């Protein structure tokens, strides 16, 4: 299957070379790869251009945006800019972060999964990070059914049905909810060990701490589901104050009457799905 890749990259000179090298040795080569240097002030674009000169499937482009690293909106805007540069004949679209090292069979494996299951909408592996001893350990802070936004592959049919990615924090949760709303399946491949070179959220601006709660409001979770989700995330992250940050963001969004990321009907489906998943976990 034809796989196209977009890599949004803001000041990723320290990691981009390794990421692109891991893509150049894949057992199944991508059809097209767009690296979007998003307002970078380092050698990100230069590195991408050097690879583009050697590999015809790689294209390097520049994009101007804010230099503040805010999760969600900035990365999706850069991704959408790269998406416009792609040929439209892809079968699978992979959104990839620049601080990622893929196992050499990553593209071949996800291609196989999509080709054998027309109902599959989103697929991806699991993230591993190095500890202080240099060992690569699993770091998948959400449920194992969740595919991390740093290496997320979509079927073209699914990506089109859900209307692309939402330009907001929470885009990599609402996409999975909308995929299921449109009848598509999700699949994680635990044996696909993806190396994540930068700890989660390490480059995010301090203003981002309220955005998760705002995202829960935007996905129409409602107060009770937000309370449960905020508490669960705080426990998993082992950060007690995170609960108050999430709830603060929710109430701030509600006070501002912030726009929702999904319509009423999608919101009803999302709440029902969340309750269904919680009941299944409680009942085993």
Image (cartoon, grey):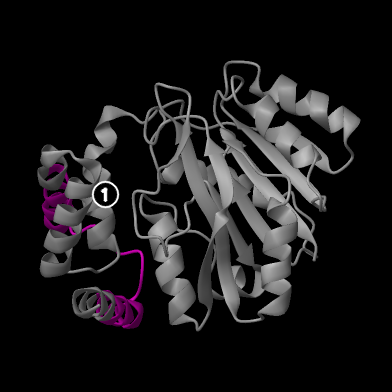
Is residue 136 magenta-colored? Answer: no
Q: Can you give x and y, in whole percent of width and height, for residue 28 in the image? A: 81, 53
Q: Can you give x and y, in whole percent of width and height, for residue 113 in the image? A: 67, 70
Residue that mark 1 sits on: 212
Q: Quadrant of the C terminus?
A: bottom left
Q: Give the side of residue 256 with respect to residue 152, left or right.
A: left
Please give the range of residues in magenta: 245-274
**Residue 80 showing in the rendered view:** no
**Residue 1, placed above or below residue 130:** below
Q: Which residue is outermost to the top?
A: 42
Nearer the observer, 8 or 241:
241
**Residue 33 showing in the rendered view:** yes
**Mark 1: few, some, or many residues within 10 Å (few <14, many ≥20)?**
many
What predominant SS class does the magenta segment belong to?
A: helix
Quadrant for residue 176, please give it.
Answer: bottom left
| Residue shown at the point (65%, 36%) measured from the top left | 36
Element at badge 1?
A: helix
**Residue 111, placed above or below residue 29:** below
Q: Can you give x and y, in whole percent of width and height, for residue 181 in the image? A: 43, 80
| Residue shown at the point (28%, 55%) measured from the top left | 215
**Residue 8, placed above or below residue 265:** above
Q: Can you give x and y, in whole percent of width and height, for residue 206 in the image? A: 26, 29
| Residue shown at the point (11%, 54%) measured from the top left | 251
Nearer the observer, 259 or 242:
242
Is residue 249 magenta-colored? Answer: yes
Q: Give the side of residue 190 with respect to residue 257, left or right.
A: right
| Residue shown at the point (39%, 21%) measured from the top left | 132
């Amino acid at each position: 299957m034809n796989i196209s890749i977009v890599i949004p990259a803001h000041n990723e000179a320290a990691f981009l070379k390794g990421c692109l090298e891991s893509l150049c040795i894949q057992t199944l080569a991508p059809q097209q790869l767009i690296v979007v240097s998003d307002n970078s002030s380092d050698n990100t674009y230069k590195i991408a251009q050097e690879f583009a000169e050697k590999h015809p499937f790689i294209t390097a482009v520049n994009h101007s945006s804010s230099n503040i690293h805010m999760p969600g909106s900035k990365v999706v805007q850069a991704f959408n800019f790269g998406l416009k540069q792609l040929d439209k004949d892809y079968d699978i679209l992979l959104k990839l972060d620049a601080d990622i090292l893929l196992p050499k069979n990553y593209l071949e494996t996800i291609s196989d999964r999509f080709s054998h299951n027309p109902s599959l909408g989103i697929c991806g592996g699991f993230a591993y990070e190095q500890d202080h001893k240099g060992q690569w350990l699993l770091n998948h802070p959400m449920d194992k059914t969740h595919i991390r936004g740093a290496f997320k592959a979509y079927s073209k049919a699914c990506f089109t049905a859900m209307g692309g990615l939402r330009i907001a924090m929470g885009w990599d949760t609402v996409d999975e909810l909308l995929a299921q709303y449109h009848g598509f399946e999700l699949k994680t491949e635990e044996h696909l060990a993806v190396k994540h070179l930068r700890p989660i959220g390490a480059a995010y601006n301090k203003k981002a701490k309220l955005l998760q709660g705002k995202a829960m409001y935007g996905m129409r979770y409602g107060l009770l589901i937000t309370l449960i989700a905020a508490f669960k995330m705080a426990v998993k992250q082992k950060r007690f104050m995170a609960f108050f940050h999430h709830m603060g963001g929710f109430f701030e969004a509600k006070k501002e009457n912030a726009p929702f990321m999904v319509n009423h009907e999608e919101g009803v489906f999302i709440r029902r799905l969340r309750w269904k998943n919680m009941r299944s976990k409680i009942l085993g």
